Image: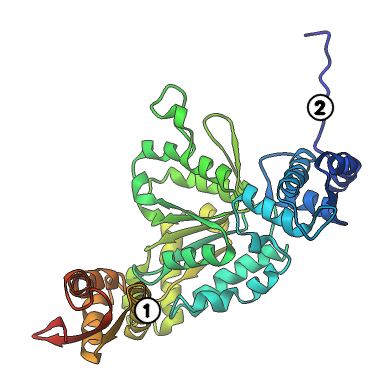
Amino acid sequence: MRRFQQIDIAEPSVDDAICIVEGLRPSYEKFHSVKYAAGVVEFAVRSAAKHIRDRFLPDKAIDLIDEAGAYRETHPLTTQKRQTVDRRLLTDILARVCKIDAEALKEQSNDALRTLESDIKKEIFGQDEAVARVVEAVQMSKAGLADDTKPMASLLFVGPTGVGKTEVARVLSERMGMKLVRFDMSEYAEKHAVAKLIGSPAGYVGYEDGGLLTAAVRKTPNCVLLFDEIEKAHPDIFNIFLQMMDYAALTDNHGERADFRNAVIIMTSNAGAQYASRASIGFTGSVSRGDAMLTTVKKTFKPEFINRLTDIVVFHDMSRQMASLILDKKLAQLQAKLSAKNVTLHLSTEARELLLTKGFTPEYGARELDRVIGSMLKPLLMREILFGKLKKSGDAVVDVKDGALRLA
C-alpha cells in the first residue's frame, strides 16, 4: 500500500453538479425514452442538495432524474407522444425519497406558509402569542434568514400541563407536511437510558440496534422532533441536545451520521408552571406571569442550553372559555365519526356544561376532556348504536338527569 498515493475527491459545488448532470441528460433521455423539461436538471440538483443530507452530489441528483425517468417510462401519459419529465413529477419523487408531503416542496408552499399561523389557530385556542412565535421561527428558516448549519428551529415550549404544547407540535407537523417523531423524556430518567438515543457502546446490550434518535432522523430527515417533558430526563441528555442544536448532527455508536438541518426541534417543559397560578403575588398580568416562568426556566436549565435555543415559547393558563372551544372541537370530531353511521348528536346546554365542568380544571387544563367524553358520553352512544334505537340511524339527544348524562 505504501506505493499508492491517496487522492481525496471533494463533493462538487451545486453549480458544478448541474453541469455534470446536464452532461448526463442525453444518456438518461435515450435510456428511458423520455425528455427532461427545461430547468428540471437544475431543479433536481438544487432540491437534492437542500433536502437529501445523507448523500453527496452529483450522485443523489442523478438518482432523482434516473428514478423520475424510470417512473415516466413505466407510467406514460397518454396525451404525450414523447414522454416528458417535469418538475411536478420530480417533486413527487423527491417527496417519496425524503418522506415529506409533496405540497410542502412545491414553490406554491409559500402560500401555505402565509396561512400557517391562521391554520394552526383554528385548532389551537387561546395561545395566539405562542403560535405566532412558533410560526415566525419556522418562516425565518424557510426564508433563508436563519443559520443553515443548524436545525430549522430549536424551540422550548414551557407552560402548565394541558394547555396545548404537544398539540401545537402535532398540528405544526401536519400543516408543514412533516412527520412528527416523539420521544417521551420520562423514559430517559436513568443515566444508562440516555445511550439509547445514539446507541449503546460496543460490548453493551443493544449495540447492534443503533440509536433510536439517530435512526429516526436518518430515516425521516424532514421531521418535527418532539421531546416531551425534558425536565424528567437525566442531565446527561443535554450533552446530546447541545450537539444536536449547535451542529445539527449526531453520530451514532456505529459511526453513522444523522443530519438535523431539515428538522424542527421542539422540547416541552412544565418548569415554572407553578408560578402561573401565583401571578397575583408580586406579578400582575399575563406578561409578568410569563416573565416569572421564564425566570424559573433559566434557573432550571444551564445557560449553554438556553443560548442555543431559537426561542422559548410561553404557553399561558387554560381558561374556561378556551376549554369550551376545545370541547366544541372534540364534540365535532365525535360527530364526524357518528355521521358515518347516520347518527346525529344533540347535546342540551346542561349536558354540555356537565362535560365542561368534569373535564376542565385550572390545574390540569383541558387534558381530562377526552377521558370525560370517553367515560360519560361515549358509553351511552355505544349501547344505543349496538343494541338500541341508533342501530341503523337516528338522532342522539343527550340531557342531564340526576347529575348524569342520559339519552332522551
The amino acid type of the residue labelled 2 equals Asp
Pointer 2 local density, CA inside 10 Å: few below 14, some 14–19, many at least 20: few
Q: Residue 7: percent from the left, percent from the top?
A: 83, 23
The amino acid type of the residue labelled 1 equals Ala
Q: Residue 136: percent from the left, percent from the top?
A: 61, 71
Q: Nearer the viewer, residue 70 or 213?
A: 70
Q: Nearer the viewer, residue 403 or 143?
A: 403
Residue that mark 1 sits on: 332
- Looking at the rendered structure, the secondary structure element under dot 2 is loop
Left or right placement of residue 114 versus residue 201 in this view: right
> Would you identify the image quadrant in which residue 204 lies?
top left
Q: Which mark is residue 302?
A: none
> Would you identify the image quadrant in which residue 372 lies?
bottom left
Q: Residue furthest left?
A: 402
Above-or-below relation of 122 to 3: below
Q: Nearer the viewer, residue 4 or 300?
A: 4
- Looking at the rendered structure, the secondary structure element under dot 1 is helix
Above-or-below relation of 246 to 5: below
Q: Are marks 2 and 1 in contact (CB under 8 Å)?
A: no
User: Which residue is at 38% across, 72% downward?
Assistant: 163
Residue that mark 2 sits on: 8
